[in-house]
């Protein structure tokens, strides 16, 4: 089976056929950093990291572009409320976003363009649209003329133009030819950032930014455009309209991940139900949070609960514990090839739930092989398992997770080893009370001891 993806534009699952054989160009809408990231942002980050990793594992040369919308109405509003310069608001929050991606093991993008660095490309795109009759200037504001593209506008979101309501921050501007026209460029206002253009100073509209950045790095036509389902309209619809009206082929596949809700409601500051990534990291380790955010199918909606996070953490720990025990018996086996069942699941529209079922079945088989002392089978299973977990970004032996947040691991290991030697000496002289006391003191310190045929092993207690 070759890779098949659900395309929002056609509302169907399609075979992935890249523009250039062996290469894949992917553009993902990244952060608008007006605040720290919530777990919905991070779900999107993990979703497209899984796509990126599977394309790489499938042999593609991938150009992965994830943008930063570092000038936007929301950022400007936060700056006005806090008295902090708009660029400082964007920069500080973008650093938090990037730390979040890093903590969750997301691969860095090929390029991470910022809107403020691509105004020249936006000016060129606006000029093309104006010259072709698809945009117009009114007092320093430039609007896209929706009626000039009426036969195609709404195709991505599957809406009829007659049924659409105006959307965006220019609703009610009576200078527009049609209420549904959207802003490409916004004329300068006192105290706001601005750049010079042939139509006067101002700043870009949100939709224009992404079209300019996507085509700058991926060309006028590229393979995959991704983002959250909440971006389909108006953002992605407007991107598609302005880019194709200008003559670009633009994205050939549109992917959208489902929302992450809390108690059935979309996260919102006004509701007071925003869950930040930092909140999850207080309750589970980064690898466990990644498992939770990536375990459901990317198009499904997730409703966050502490119980679901706890269950995901427990599932990951079962995998982790097996890998640690297998290495003790079989040595550090390098990743091999993924099983065909895993590849088939990932090729079927990134079927991570089915892929994880293959992972857990491999763990069960590995435990059976370990119990039987079948080292050859264990070596094979561990190699396959590491390959699968590498695709999912969850390999416990990857440097990301082996050393995560534990700079004192060598010291702790040495100290626990001394205690275990003392315990073994006590047992050898049949002083079982002393041996049990050492075990109990280690347990009180959060160190769990397991006696195995190969000697005692230890691990830190997980909450």
Image (cartoon, rainbow, N blue to C red):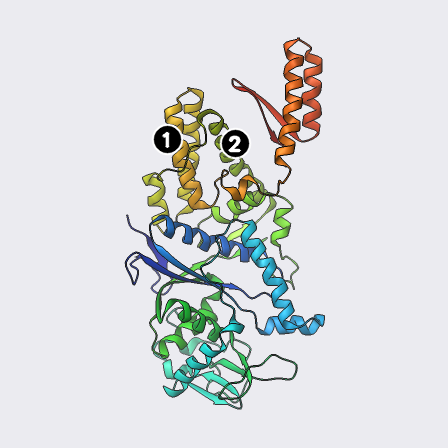
> Closer to us: mark 2 or mark 1?
1
Give x and y (percent) for residue 315: 51, 37
Q: How far apart are marks 2 and 1 (CA)?
A: 17 Å
Taking 200 as reference, is 249 left or right? left
Q: Residues within 10 Å of mark 2 (few under 14, many from 20)?
A: few
Residue ID for mark 2: 321
In this rendering, is residue 426 above or below 205? above
Residue at 51%, 31% in the rendered image: 324
Q: Is residue 160 visible?
A: no
Label 1 crowd bin: few (<14), some (14–19), many (20+), radius 10 Å: some
State the count of labels.
Answer: 2
Residue 21: quadrant of the picture = bottom left
Residue 326 in the image, given as x and y percentages of width and height: 46, 28
Residues marked 2 and 1 touching at CB (< 8 Å): no
The numbered mark at residue 211 is: none
Secondary element under disc 1, as helix, strand or loop, is helix
- Is 144 situated above or below 89? below
Q: Is residue 245 shown to the viewer in this render?
A: yes
Q: Name the residue beneath numbered marker 1.
A: 380
Image position of 83 with respect to 40: above or below: below
Query: 63 or 460: nearer the eye?
Result: 63
Which residue is drawn at the image coordinates 56% and 57% (left, top)? 98
Q: Front-most of 263 and 50?
A: 50
Residue 382, quarter of picture:
top left
Q: Where is residue 20 in the image (x, y as percent from the top left)?
A: 29, 61
Q: Earlier in the sequence, mark 2 or mark 1?
A: 2
Instruction: Give the quadrant of the C terminus.
Output: top right
Kindly identify the residue that appears in the image at 45 percent across and 66 percent down. Answer: 232
Q: Where is residue 271 in the image (x, y as percent from the top left)?
A: 64, 61
């Amino acid at each position: 089976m070759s890779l098949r993806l659900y395309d929002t534009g056609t509302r169907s699952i399609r075979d992935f056929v890249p523009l250039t054989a062996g290469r894949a160009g992917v553009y993902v809408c990244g952060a608008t950093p007006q605040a720290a990231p919530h777990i919905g942002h991070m779900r999107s980050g993990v979703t497209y990291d899984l796509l990126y990793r599977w394309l790489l594992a499938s042999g593609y040369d991938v150009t992965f572009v994830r943008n930063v919308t570092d000038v936007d109405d929301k950022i400007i509003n936060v700056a006005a409320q806090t008295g902090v310069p708009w660029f400082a608001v964007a920069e500080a929050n973008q650093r938090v976003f990037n730390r979040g991606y890093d903590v969750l093991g997301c691969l860095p993008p090929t390029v991470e363009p910022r809107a403020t660095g691509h105004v020249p490309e936006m000016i060129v795109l606006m000029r093309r649209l104006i010259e072709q009759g698809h945009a117009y200037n009114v007092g320093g504001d430039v609007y896209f003329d929706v009626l000039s593209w009426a036969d195609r506008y709404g195709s991505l979101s599957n809406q009829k133009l007659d049924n659409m309501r105006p959307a965006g921050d220019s609703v009610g501007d009576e200078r527009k030819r049609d209420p549904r026209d959207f802003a490409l460029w916004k004329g300068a206002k006192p105290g706001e950032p601005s750049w010079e253009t042939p139509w006067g100073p101002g700043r870009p509209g949100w939709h224009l930014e992404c079209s300019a950045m996507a085509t700058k790095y991926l060309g006028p036509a590229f393979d995959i455009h991704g983002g959250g389902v909440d971006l389909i309209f108006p953002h992605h619809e407007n991107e598609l309209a302005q880019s194709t009206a200008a003559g670009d082929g633009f994205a050939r596949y549109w992917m959208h991940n489902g929302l992450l809700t809390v108690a059935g409601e979309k996260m919102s500051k006004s509701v007071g139900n925003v869950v930040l990534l930092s909140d999850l990291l207080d309750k589970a380790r980064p690898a466990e949070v990644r498992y939770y955010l990536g375990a459901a199918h990317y198009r499904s909606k997730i409703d966050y609960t502490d119980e679901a996070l706890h269950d995901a953490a427990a599932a990951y720990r079962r995998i982790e514990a097996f890998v640690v025990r297998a290495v003790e018996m079989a040595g550090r086996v390098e990743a091999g090839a993924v099983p065909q069942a895993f590849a088939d699941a990932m090729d079927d529209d990134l079927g991570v739930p089915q892929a994880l079922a293959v992972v857990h079945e491999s763990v069960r088989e590995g435990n059976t092989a370990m119990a039987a002392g079948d080292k050859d089978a264990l070596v094979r299973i561990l190699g396959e398992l590491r390959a699968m977990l590498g695709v999912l970004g969850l390999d416990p032996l990857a440097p990301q997770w082996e050393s995560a947040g534990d700079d004192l691991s060598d010291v702790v290991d040495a100290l626990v080893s001394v205690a275990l030697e003392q315990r073994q000496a006590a047992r050898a002289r049949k002083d079982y009370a002393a041996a049990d006391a050492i075990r109990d003191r280690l347990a009180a310190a959060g160190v769990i001891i397991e006696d195995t045929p190969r000697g005692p092993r230890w691990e830190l207690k997980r909450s």
